[in-house]
Image (tube, rainbow, N blue to C red):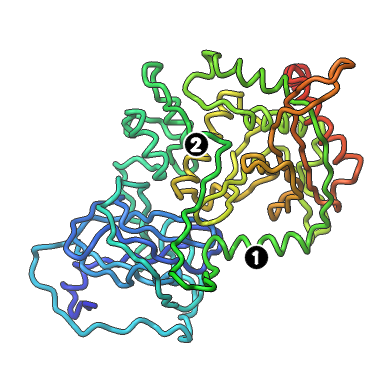
Amino acid sequence: MTTMTDTSNAARFREFKMPDVGEGLTEAEILKWYVQPGDTVTDGQVVCEVETAKAAVELPIPFDGVVHELRFPEGTTVDVGQVIIAVDVAPGSGPAAAEPEAPAPAPEAEAPKGRQPVLVGYGVAESSTKRRARKGAETAPPAAAPAAVQAELNGQGTAAVPEARPLAKPPVRKLAKDLGIDLATVTPTGVGGVITREDVHAAATPSEPVAPAAPAVEPVVPVAEPVPAGARETRIPVKGVRKAIAQAMVGSAFTAPHVTEFVTVDVTRTMKLVAELKEDKDMAGVRVNPLLVIAKALLVAIKRNPGVNAVWDEANQEIVQKHYVNLGIAAATPRGLIVPNIKDAHDQTLPQLAASLGELVATARDGKTSPAAMAGGTVTITNVGVFGVDTGTPILNPGESAILAVGAIKLQPWVHKGKVKPRQVTTLALSFDHRLIDGELGSKFLADIAAILEQPKRLITWA
C-alpha cells in the first residue's frame, strides 16, 4: 500500500470507498476487479463487481486517472465506507513517495464512529472489515463498458459531478448502446435528471426496434461445482444473496400468518391467445408467453379487488393499501432466488408489460439486477411450472401481501361443454397474509384470476 507523505503528493491521489449500493447494506464482497495497478480509468468506467446481500453490482469510478493501488483482493468482504481503490489523478507530475503497506483492520477491530458520505444518495454503515477466502478466483476480464456516472463527495461535503455526462444506470447505458441511441440526445425524466429505460425507448426511432427479450418463463440453471472424487459431503458458505434469502424467508414465515388457496383452471383459450399475440404486429420485438397473460390477469384482478394490494404496518397497527402495483417476478439465478419487480406495472399496456418482463428476466440472467429493482414490491408471481411442478405453497416476499404460484400447463382430460376433451390445464396457488386479507377477499381475487385465464376476453370487459 502506498501512502502520500506530502501535500502535493496527497493532491495527486483520490480514494474510492465501498458505497452502500442498497438500503442500509453494511458490507459487500469483491467478486472481480476489472482493472489492475497501472491501468488508465475514466469517469464512469466500471472498475469492479461486488456482491451484496441483495445482488451483484458493478461499481463505476467517479474520476479519471491511473490506478495506483487495489486495497483488497477478490473474495474479500469489505465494509461500506472502506477505501477499495486509490487512483493517481495527476500522473506524470512526479514520483509518489512510498511508505510501507499498512495492514487492513482486523475483523474484531472497532469501526470508526459516525457516517461519512461516499456516493450521492448513499450512506456509510458502521461496521468492521472482514476478510474471507474465495475459492476459484479467476483473472478479471478487461474493463467493462462505461456505467452510470456517480458523484463522489469530498471531505468538505461538496459533490464533484461532471455536468456534461448524461446520468444513467449501467443497464440503461447498455440498452441505449444496443438500440444505437446517443444518451446525450435523450431527455431524462428520472429523479435528479437520470435517464430511464422509458426515456431510451422513447428516443428510439421506428427503424430501430427493441431486440427480442429473453424468455420470461425459462429458469436460470445454476452450474454445479464438480465434486472431488471420494468426497462424502460438501460445505457451502451461506453468504450474499443466499444468506439474505434465508433470513427473509424465515422472517416472513414466522411473522405473517400464511393462508394458501388453490384452483385448477382450463387455460386452453389463454394458450390460443398467446399464439395469436405472437403473430400480432403490435407485439413485434417482445417475447410473448403464458406468463405475460397471467401477469396481466393478476393486475386486472387487483383492480377488481384492491384490498389485496396492501401491507401490514406492525409499528402503527395499520393496513397500508397501495394504489400502485410493483409486480414482482421470482427468478432463479446462480446466486439464488431473487424477486425483482416491475415498477407501476398497473399502468403498462400489454406490449409494455411484455418488454418489462423480458428486460427483468434478461437482467436477472446476467446477474445484474440492482437492489433498487428488488425493493418496493407489492405482489409477486412465481412460476414453478417451468420445472414441471403442478403447484406449491409459496412463502410471501417480505413486505408484500400476496404471492401467486403458477403450475405447469399440461394437456389433461377435462369436461368441456358436457364432454370429456383434452384441454390445457394448470393449477394456481395463492398465498396471502391473513392479517389483512380474509378468506373471502383472497378467494375472490384468486377466482378472478382463474376466470380471466379461462375466458381471456375478460381482460377487456373487466379492465
- x%, y% of residue 149? 35, 49
108 w.r.t. 432: above or below: below
Q: Nearer the viewer, residue 274 or 228?
A: 228
Q: Residue shown at 69%/60% (left/top)?
A: 249
Side of 114 where 151 appears, left or right: left
N-terminal-most mark, 2 or 1? 1
Q: Quadrant of residue 318?
A: bottom right
Most foreground residue, 233 or 169:
233
Residue 252, how many percent across, how many down? 73, 59
**Mark 1 highlights which residue?**
247
Residue 234 lies left or right of residue 422; in this view the side is left
Looking at the image, residue 200 sits to the left or right of residue 337; the answer is left
| Residue bearing mark 2 | 359
Q: Are marks 2 and 1 in contact (CB under 8 Å)?
A: no
Q: Residue furthest front?
A: 230
Q: Could you tell me how far apart the alpha carbons at marks 2 and 1 are, in whole angstroms?
A: 27 Å
Q: Which mark is residue 204?
A: none
Depth check: 154 or 202 in front?
Answer: 202
Which image quarter holds the C terminus?
Answer: top right
Q: Helix, strand, or loop for circle 1?
A: helix
Residue 460 position, x and y percent, is 73, 17
